[in-house]
Image: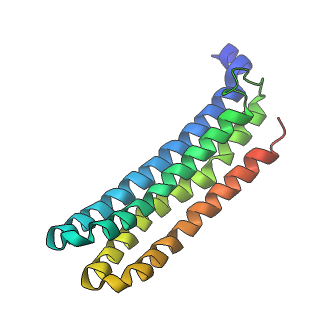
Amino acid sequence: MTEFFAEMGGLALAIAGASIAVILGGIGSSVGVGLAGQAGAGVVTEQPEKFGKVLVLEALPGTQGIYGFLVGFLILLVTGILTGEPKDLSIAQGWQLFFACFPAGLACLLSGIHQGKVTAGGMNMVAKDESNMGKAMVLSAMVETYAVLGFLVSALLVFFIKL
């Protein structure tokens, strides 16, 4: 085990961090899209002509998974894994990259879930009055702001870690 960490520890930690960003972002989006989809199914059952608007709203919580994926991709890119020439990272560098993934991972997990809840409420607004579509989108987008901020912090950390 000591030999593994001496040879691959830093890179393994970076990969673990990338995995965390992708997994947490994916969970947030999955739950959020699921919550929105449940509400959307109810709306479309009663008013099938509103499927297009419901689909647009349901897609909104899916972006957190994309942000988590992008952070994971950045880690794979800066470590050289994608080029086939992985860098020899120290344990300290590995820990830095590992923790750089947390702002995006946690922000995307929580905002994806809560954006799904807000979007479900927005679908109820649209069910009652289609002219509420813009309001429903703005309310949902407000929650996404924090996923974007988490992504930006993670990306900045990744770019400014000396490798």
The quarter of the rendered structure image containing the N terminus is: top right
In the displayed structure, would residue 30 be above or below residue 137? above
Height in image: 140 above or below 5?
Answer: below
Q: From the top left corner, tell me how far across and down residue 61 is, in percent.
A: 44, 61
Is 74 positioned to the left or the right of 27 in the image? right
Farthest residue, direction left: 46
Residue 123: image quadrant is bottom left
Tell me residue 10's x, y (percent): 71, 28
Which residue appears at 45% of the width and 72% of the height? 140
| Number of marks present in the image shown | 0
Please say if 93 is above or below 3. Answer: below
Q: Position of residue 163 (x, y in %)?
A: 82, 34
Q: How is the image coloured?
A: rainbow
View extreme (top): residue: 3
Residue 25 rendering spot, x and y as whole percentages: 50, 50
Q: Nearer the viewer, residue 94 or 33?
A: 33
- Residue 152's place in the image compared with 145, above or below, is above
Q: Identify the residue at image location x=69%, y=14%.
A: 3
> Residue at the right extreme?
162
- Residue at 63 percent across and 46 percent down: it is 101
Residue 163 relative to residue 72: left or right: right
Q: Residue at x 67, y 38 (%)?
A: 75
